[in-house]
C-alpha cells in the first residue's frame, strides 16, 4: 500500500490517546472511525475533540468552518464492523493490557482485508507478541504517540520481529502527514522513551511514599531544578496512574529489573481509582481550582 492509498483510518479506543489520534488524523484530511466499547466513552472522546478544536479556533489557528469539516470526518461508534468498514490503517489505543489487546487483534484480523495495516499505540507491550495474534505480522507495527497528541510532536515507530520495511515506510510517511517527527526503535519493552521515563516517574512516587518531599515541592524542584516543563507528579496525573502501573508491571516482568518495580503507593492509588486527571483525583485534586496538591503521610 502507498501513502496516497490511505483514505480511511480506524482508531480503536476513544480515551485520552484515542481521541487525540482521531483528532490529528481527521485534521490531516483522513476519514476516521473511532470505536470504543460503550456510548459514553465514544461521547466523551467526541466531546474532548470538540473542546480541543474549539481552543484552536479561539487561538485563530483554524476557522470555525475548518473545525466543522474536521468533525465531519470523524465517525464515533461502538460497532466494530461499522468501524472497520473500508479502512486502510487501524491505530489501536485501547487500555494497556496485553491479553485484551491480543484478543482484539485476533478478532479484527478475521474481519479486515489482509492488506490493512495494524499499528499499536502501546506504551510498552511487545509488538511481536501482539502481531503473533494475527496472520499479518509483516503488516503490524508500533506507532507510539505522546500525550496530548495534538500538541506533542513525536511518534516513536517500533518494528516488531517480522514488520516489513514497506509497513515501516508507510507508517513513517503517515506520521509525517499527521505533522509529527519520527524516530525508529527496535523492539524492546517500553521502547526508548518509556525505558528512560518510567524509572524517573516511579522514583518520584517512592519519594512521596517515603515522605522525602511534598507533592508541591517535588514538582517545583524538578520544574525549576531540571528545567522540565512540568513536575513528575503533574505528569503522572496527565498520563494516568492506571496506565503507568500497567506499563511498570509489564516492564518489570519483562526485564526482571527492580528499577521498574511499582511503589505500593501507586498500586494503592490505582486500587482506589485515583487515576489522575481523568478520574478527577491523583497526586492533585482536580475538583479545586487551581488543582490542589494532596497530602501523603
Ligand atoms: N496516557 C498516556 O500518556 C499514553 C501515552 C502514549 C501511549 N499510551 C497508550 O495508549 C493506550 C491507551 O491509553 P489511554 O491513556 O488513552 O487510556 P484510556 O484509559 O484513557 O483509554 C482507553 C480506552 O480504551 C477503551 N477500550 C477498552 N477496551 C476496548 C476495546 N476492546 N475496544 C475499544 N476500546 C476499548 C476504554 O473504554 C477507554 O475509553 C494504551 O496502550 C497506553 O499505554 C498512553
Image: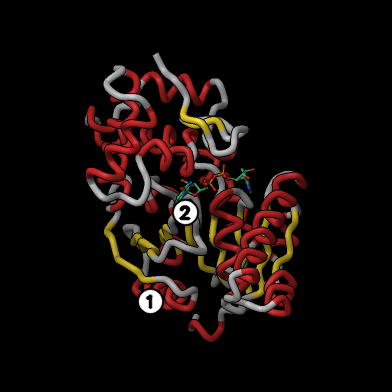
Q: Position of residue 221 (x, y in %)?
A: 27, 37
Residue, disc 2:
147
Given this view, does label 1 or label 2 mark the residue nearer the observer?
2
Q: Residue at image x 30%, y 24%?
A: 213
Question: Quadrant location of residue 202?
Answer: top left
Image quarter of the C terminus: top left
**Whole-number angstrom distance, CA of label 1 to CA of label 2:** 23 Å
Q: Residues within 10 Å of mark 1 (few under 14, many from 20)?
A: few
Q: Position of residue 236 (x, y in %)?
A: 42, 38
Q: Secondary structure at mark 1?
A: helix
Label 2 near ligand 1 (CB < 8 Å): yes
User: Cβ–Cβ below 8 Å for labels 1 and 2?
Assistant: no
Viewer-nearest residue: 252 or 114 = 252
Q: Position of residue 255 (x, y in %)?
A: 25, 36
Above or below — where is 61 with respect to 122? below
Q: Residue at image x 63%, y 74%?
A: 8
Which comes before the other along the chain, label 1 or label 2?
Answer: 2
Residue, disc 1:
169
Q: Is residue 6 left or right of residue 244?
A: right
Q: Residue at image x 64%, y 69%?
A: 58
Q: Residues within 10 Å of mark 2 (few under 14, many from 20)?
A: some
Amino acid at each position: 500500500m502507498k501513502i496516497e492509498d490511505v483514505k480511511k483510518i480506524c482508531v480503536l479506543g476513544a480515551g485520552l490517546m484515542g481521541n487525540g489520534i482521531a483528532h490529528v488524523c481527521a485534521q490531516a484530511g483522513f476519514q476516521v472511525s473511532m470505536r470504543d466499547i460503550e456510548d459514553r466513552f465514544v461521547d466523551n472522546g467526541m466531546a474532548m475533540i470538540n473542546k480541543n478544536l474549539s481552543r484552536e479556533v479561539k487561538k485563530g489557528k483554524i476557522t470555525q468552518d475548518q473545525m466543522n469539516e474536521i468533525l465531519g470526518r470523524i465517525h464515533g461508534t461502538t460497532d466494530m464492523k461499522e468501524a472497520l468498514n473500508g479502512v486502510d490503517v487501524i491505530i489501536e489505543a485501547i487500555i494497556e493490557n496485553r491479553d485484551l489487546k491480543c484478543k482484539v487483534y485476533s478478532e479484527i484480523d478475521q474481519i479486515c482485508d489482509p492488506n490493512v495495516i495494524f499499528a499499536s499505540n502501546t506504551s510498552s507491550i511487545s509488538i511481536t507478541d501482539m502481531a503473533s495474534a494475527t496472520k499479518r505480522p509483516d503488516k503490524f507495527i508500533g506507532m507510539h504517540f505522546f500525550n496530548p497528541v495534538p500538541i506533542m510532536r513525536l511518534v516513536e515507530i517500533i518494528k516488531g520481529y517480522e514488520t516489513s520495511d514497506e509497513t515501516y515506510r508507510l507508517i513513517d510517511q503517515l506520521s509525517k502527514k499527521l505533522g509529527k517527527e519520527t524516530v525508529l526503535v527496535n523492539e524492546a519493552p517500553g521502547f526508548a522513551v518509556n525505558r528512560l521515563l518510567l524509572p524517573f516517574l516511579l522514583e518520584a512516587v517512592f519519594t512521596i511514599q517515603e515522605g522525602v518531599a511534598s507533592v508541591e515541592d517535588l514538582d517545583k524542584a524538578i520544574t525549576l531544578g531540571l528545567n522540565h516543563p512540568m513536575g513528575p507528579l503533574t505528569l503522572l496525573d496527565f498520563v494516568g496512574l492506571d496506565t503507568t502501573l500497567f506499563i511498570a508491571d509489564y516492564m518489570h516482568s519483562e526485564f526482571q529489573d527492580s528499577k521498574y518495580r511499582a511503589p505500593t503507593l501507586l498500586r494503592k492509588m490505582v486500587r482506589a481509582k485515583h487515576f489522575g486527571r481523568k478520574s478527577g483525583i491523583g497526586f492533585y485534586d482536580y475538583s479545586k481550582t487551581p488543582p490542589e496538591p494532596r497530602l501523603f503521610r
